Amino acid sequence: MTVDRGLLATLKAKPGKGDELAAFLEQGRALAAAETGTVTWYAFKIDDTTYGIFDTFETEQARQAHLGGQIPVALGQVAEDLLAADPDIRPVDVIALT
């Protein structure tokens, strides 16, 4: 297995919506687990309004499939209610892992 690419997304919750955003992210775990090309998927909290997702892939095709998959669609459906700004989604190169 060669995991050499990922996605890093940071999400800013509207005031008072952090817990709802966290609950939404917890639900995303099942969607990510169903994706055959997603190797790892992490949702995390930085502070009361800043959350994130980090996921990894073995191929560019898997990363692109994820970007066009169910999680971004679901996020788009709740973004207006939960997010203070558009998500910051960046492709990253994985340079080391254990």
Image (cartoon, rainbow, N blue to C red):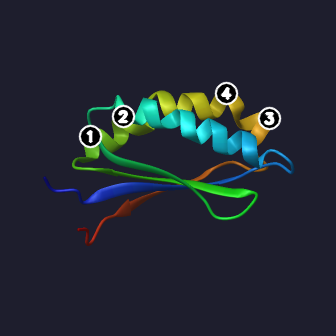
Quarter where residue 66 is shown: top left
Do callouts 1 and 2 mark residues in contact (Cβ within 8 Å)?
no
Q: Nearer the viewer, mark 3 or mark 1?
A: 3
Secondary structure found at label 3: helix
Q: Residue 47 in the image: x percent, y percent?
A: 70, 64
Counting residues from the start of the chain, the first of labels 2 and 4 encountered is 2
Secondary structure found at label 2: helix
Q: Nearer the viewer, mark 1 or mark 4?
A: 4
At 26% from the left and 40% from the top, the residue drawn is: 61
Disc 2 marks a residue whose amino acid type is Ala
| Dot 4 alpha-carbon crowd within 10 angstroms: few under 14, some 14 to 19, many 20 or more | few
Q: Is residue 50 left or right of residue 92?
A: right
Residue that sits furthest to the left in the current view: 1
Secondary structure found at label 4: helix
Quarter where residue 73 is shown: top right
Q: Is residue 1 left or right of residue 19?
A: left
Counting residues from the start of the chain, the first of labels 1 and 4 encountered is 1
Marks 3/1: CA distance? 31 Å
Counting residues from the start of the chain, the first of labels 3 and 2 encountered is 2
Figure quadrant of the C terminus: bottom left
| Dot 1 alpha-carbon crowd within 10 angstroms: few under 14, some 14 to 19, many 20 or more | few
At 34% from the left and 44% from the top, the residue drawn is: 63
Q: Nearer the viewer, mark 2 or mark 4?
A: 2
Tell me the residue that label 1 is attached to.
61
Tell me the residue that label 4 is attached to.
77
Marks 2/4: CA distance? 20 Å
For residue 33, the mark is: 2
For residue 81, the mark is: 3
Residue 31 appears in the picture as rendered: yes
Q: Is residue 96 left or right of residue 72?
A: left
